[in-house]
Image (spheres, grey):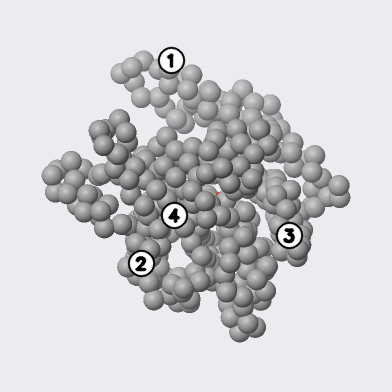
Amino acid sequence: MKDFSTRDALEELSDSKEVADSAIIRMIYAYYANYVHWSGPEFSLGFDQMRDIYEQSQELLGSFQSFCQFAVKTTAPNQKPNQREIVAEFVSTLPPQKQKLWHSIYPVRYQLRMLGDIGATLLMISDIVSRNIASSDAQEEFFGVDLGTGTGILLAGQEVLARRHGFRTRILHGIEMDDAVASKTREFCHKLWYVIHQWDTTQAKTWSALPYKPLTCITNENIPAANETMDREPFIQNMWILWNTRRDLIQPHTAFVPDELEIVKNPATTETEVRYICSPKNWFYPDDLRDDVGAFDRAGLGSLYKYLIPDRIKLWGTKVPLKLVSPMGAERMWVFGYQRSFLSRF
Ligand SMILES: C[S@@+](CC[C@H](N)C(=O)[O-])C[C@H]1O[C@@H](n2cnc3c(N)ncnc32)[C@H](O)[C@@H]1O
């Protein structure tokens, strides 16, 4: 296989007749390798080099996680483990070439775990690129916004969607709150013409500062992992603020990815099932959820989101248990060779 870059992989995906999973996977690997190595999206690498970068960096992140777990276990119960000391100690165990790699991945370690979950990233990108949005005429612009951008991979998916529908003008903005993540992603993405802002997606002023244009696609991956609670990520708050500030920019064909998330009250805290369905029909904040959040707050019980967990997500019009999509679940799917065909079982 010839060396290729993120740019080449995006072109292949945009121009091919069918979107093959293998082409999406090549794009994810190229994006990952170019992003980690500061080489920029136009730098060609061999697939073997990409896999090496991928494997070495994921291995480092895994060892760091085990190192932290060990440090926490061996710290006296009345003492708080010092993160800076743990990192310094970990780095001192690494040979020089790994230290260089470590410095590139450390600020984006959480985001690389997500991007590096190839199975889950494949599912999200496939969902984006397979959306039916209105075809463009020469005048029309594609305006896409990604909320909680991380590495920016979902903007790459939006670019492919726009190009496959013939939009000549693409305006792609990503919003990421973390300073170090936003600056690394901005540096990587400026050659792809994506604009990255270091802003908070839950603030009205974020939407006021974005271009005032009809929205073609919104991606919102601020979703907690299947075993975490909804207070960990602002999925609902993101969509609610969009609705309150910019509902006039939402078109009948605006694509929302994902376009449905079902959340449930943690079964350990309730005897009867409590389920909320968040979709564009209710601006991702159904009335029953809004009532319950208010009642909980008024009763002085704090945030109801601490008791809610994401349960099912809609991909290609099919609801899938999130535990099969988020880390581990996707790995399992991958190992067993399940891909899109797997979803038809639900
Ligand atoms: C679950 S990750 C999504 C990662 C991204 N889709 C990717 O593949 O790299 C959520 C991201 O949203 C960011 N984030 C969390 N809360 C945010 C907020 N209120 N405003 C902007 N970004 C936020 C986190 O720093 C993290 O990078």
Front in this rendered view, residue 74 or 113? 113
SS under mark 4: loop
The residue at label 4 has a CB less than 8 Å from ligand 1: no
Residue 23 in view = yes
- Residue depicted at x 46% and y 74%: 251
The nearer-to-camera label among 1 and 4 is: 4
Residue 74: numbered disc:
1
Separation (CA) of disc 3 from disc 2 = 34 Å
**Horizontal and vertical percent position of residue 75:** 40, 17
Tell me if label 2 and label 1 are in contact, CB under 8 Å.
Answer: no
Residue 243: numbered disc:
2
Q: Earlier in the sequence, mark 2 or mark 4?
A: 2
Give amino acid for label 3.
Answer: Glu
Which residue is the extreme one toward the bottom? Answer: 139
Q: Which residue is mark 4?
A: 260
Front in this rendered view, residue 121 or 263? 263
Separation (CA) of disc 3 from disc 4 = 25 Å
